[in-house]
Every structure is written in structure tokens, then in C-alpha cells.
Image (cartoon, rainbow, N blue to C red):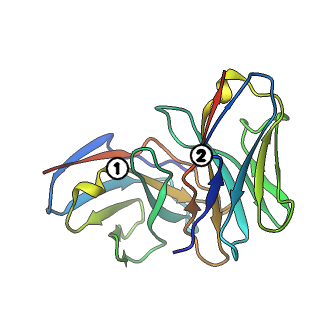
Amino acid sequence: DAKTTQPNSMESNEEEPVHLPCNHSTISGTDYIHWYRQLPSQGPEYVIHGLTSNVNNRMASLAIAEDRKSSTLILHRATLRDAAVYYCILETGANNLFFGTGTRLTVIP
Amino acid sequence: EPEVTQTPSHQVTQMGQEVILRCVPISNHLYFYWYRQILGQKVEFLVSFYNNEISEKSEIFDDQFSVERPDGSNFTLKIRSTKLEDSAMYFCASRGRGFHGYTFGSGTRLTVV
């Protein structure tokens, strides 16, 4: 499985930006970088994905390093509903996702 | 917004019994997946399914497990003879062609007693 490394936990104050880092030094040229989150007692939820360029959608932004060995998920204004486990996952050629342990984000009111 | 629907939300079964977990993927999706999550642990890949056949399966997906897409809308996971260690949340997911994001269902909690 393609490996990613994330901090176990992070905290953010409500309404402040959050930058969730991910290292994926063994990424290959065709691997997509995915981010999913899992709210308590729910299934994983797609957040964003990208290949080389930075990406923005209504939920978040994804900043990908020029060498693609790391990426950062950016939540522009954290809300209490953003408290979840965030997973950074590499989608390999087989198009399957293998989850790691993720980063547990705590949002402080 | 289209959803992946899983039924039942919770199933309790006796050890050794067969269970079938049901999923209705998003209608125009072509790729289907089962994952499981044992309480307090990470989400684990079980199997992927495309074009009416298994594309890839993990070591967890042994002979006790099978998947089927019987009627073009449902996608089922069968566990032939359940064990206590099969107790987990089981998530179904689907993906359309050309878009890499997966849509997950809300899961079925399987409890084997």
C-alpha cells in the first residue's frame, strides 16, 4: 500500500483556518492524492483530491508540493462540524483507497 | 445529492450464521467497494468490484466472503459463517467513471454474538 504520514491529532480554534499536513514521499507519478474525513459514527466522506495542481472546492483547498511528496488540506474557517478524523490517501493505479489512521481534528469553540 | 444506501443499519447475528449486507450504489456509478471498520480501528479495504467481477480483494476477504451485484442496482456482501471477529461497521462505496471521489454509505453495524 502506498504510504502516507499524518499527525495523530490537531486542534484548531473555531472560525480559524486549519492546515492539515500529509507526507507521501514514496508517491509515484500517477498516484492521486485524496482526502476524506470521517465524522463520529458516520462513513468516510470525500473532501477533495488532486494530482499535481492545487485544488479548491466548496469544502476545502488542497495544496500540493512541487515535488508531490507532501500536501496540505486547508479548511479556511473551521467550524464545530469539521471535527472529524481526516485521512490523506494515495490512490494508486489499481484505483483502490487504503486508509491509514488519519489526523483527529478537534475544533475548540 | 445522490447517496449510497446501506441496509440494515444494524444487524445482530449468531456466530456461524450467514449474513447478507445490502447496498444500493449511486445509479450511474461503475465501481463498487466494501470496507470494514472494527470499533476503534482504521477503515480496512475488503474488495473492489467492476464489470461484474472482483477487481481486487484484501487478505481479509477470504472464502467466507462473497460479493454480488444481482440485479444491476444492489451490491451485496455475504459472510457465509460469521465469527465473533467479523463484528464491525461495514461500509459500501461507489465511484463513477472519470471522477476519482468515492461516495460511502453510512454503514451497517454487524454484531456477531
Chain ID at mark 1: A
Residue at 71%, 66% in the rendered image: B31
* B60 displayed left or right of B93: right
Label 2: which secondary element: loop
Pick the front one: A78 or A5: A78
Q: Residues within 10 Å of mark 1 (few under 14, many from 20)?
A: many
Q: CA distance from mark 1 to mark 2?
A: 21 Å
Residue receiving disc 2: B9
Q: Is disc 1 in contact with disc 2, using a CB cutoff of under 8 Å?
A: no
Residue A17 screen position, x and y as percent: 18, 63
Asked which quadrant contains residue A57, the reply is bottom left
Q: Secondary structure at mark 1?
A: strand
The spot of residue B110 in percent (x, y) is 63, 35
Q: Same chain for labels 1 and 2? Say yes or no.
A: no
Residue at the (41%, 77%) spot, across then down: A53
Could you tell me the amino acid type at mark 1? Ala
